[in-house]
Image: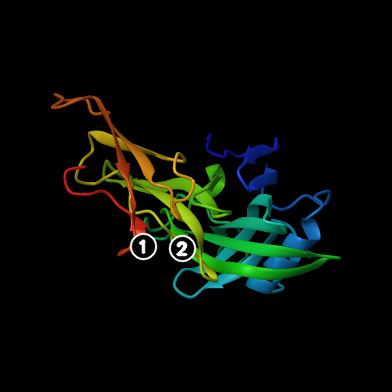
Amino acid sequence: MPILSPGIPTVPMKQLTVILSMTLPFIVSAQSPDAEIVASLMRSQYGPMFDSAHKCWIHKSKDWGLYCMAPIKIHRVDAHGTRRLYVLAEGVPMNLAGDLKEPRVGAHAAPGLVGAFAVRLDGAGKTSVLAATKELHFGSFGAASAGDAKFLKVGASDYCGWTFVSGGMWMGTIVTWHHIVAPRGTQFVDLSAIPETSEDDQDHTYVIAFDTTQLDRKFFPLLVTKRFTGEGKRFGPATVTFRVPFNTETGRYQLRKGE
C-alpha cells in the first residue's frame, strides 16, 4: 500500500481517507473552509496577540523569547465515522520590536518552534481538541525546517503524523535528524531518534520510509536506507536497507548497534 504524501488529491487507504491536505505560505487563507476553526485553535493555544503585518500569533517561549507562530500545514481526515483536522504550526523568532529575525542570525543553539494539533470536527461548527503541543523544539538558528513536512499514516487504524528533517551545520560538520511528530495521548511527540547525517559519520546519510505491508501494526516499522555519500574511500556496500521496528521501551524509532 502506498505511503500517503501531501497534496490535494484523495489517497485511498484502508479505513482512512485524507480529504484535504494543503501547504500554506504562512497563514490560513481566508478562502479556506477551515480558516475560522484554525484561527480559533491558534488563539486558544497562543493567545490573542495577532500580528497582522506578519499574519501570525505572537508566542513567548520561556527559554527562547518571542516567536511568530503560524499554521503551515492543514489536513482533514475522515476515519471510522469521525472527522478530524490536523494542524502543524511553525514559529519564526521575533525581536522585542516585533520584527522577524533573520533565521541565520543568532546563536546556533536557538531552535525553531513547531506546534502540532489534532481537532475533532463535531459538526455545526463545534470542535474539540484531541491532542495539542504548542511548542516542540527543532533545528537551529531559529529555523525548524518544517515547511517540507509530509503528512503520513504511521500506524494501524487512523494513526497519522508528520515527518520532516531538521538540523544544521557547525564548523563544517552537518548534523540532521528525521522527525516523526505524532500524537501520544493528548500531546504530540517526536517518535524518531533516527539521524539523517550524524556528527560521528559524515560519510553516510539515512533515508526513511514506512513499511505499510503490515497494516495491523500499531506503529509501522521503518525501512531505513543507509547511503554512502562521502568523498573518501568506501568500505562496504554503497547502499543498504534494513527494517527498524518501533522501540516500545524508549517510545521511539532508533538505530541498533552497527546500523
Residue pictured at 66% horizontal, 70% vertical:
129
Q: Amino acid at mark 2?
A: Val
Question: Eyeballing the image, is 207 above or below 165?
Answer: above
Between 52 and 156, the residue placed more toward the observer is 156
Residue occupying the far right of the picture: 124
Checking the image for residue 79, the label placed there is none
* Crowd around label 1: few <14 · some 14–19 · many ≥20 (10 Å): some
Residue pictured at 36% horizontal, 62% vertical:
251
* Crowd around label 2: few <14 · some 14–19 · many ≥20 (10 Å): many
- Image depth: mark 2 or mark 1 in front: 1
Question: Eyeballing the image, is 209 above or below 65?
Answer: above
Q: In the rendered structure, are the residues bearing label 2 and label 1 in contact, judged by CB atoms less than 8 Å apart? A: yes
Q: Amino acid at mark 1?
A: Gly
Residue pictured at 31% horizontal, 41% vertical:
243
Checking the image for residue 189, the label placed there is 2
Between 11 and 161, the residue placed more toward the observer is 11
Dot 2 or dot 1, earlier in sequence? 2
Q: Which residue is mark 1?
A: 251
In the image, taking residue 122 as reference, residue 139 lies left or right, namely left
Residue pictured at 22% horizontal, 33% vertical:
203
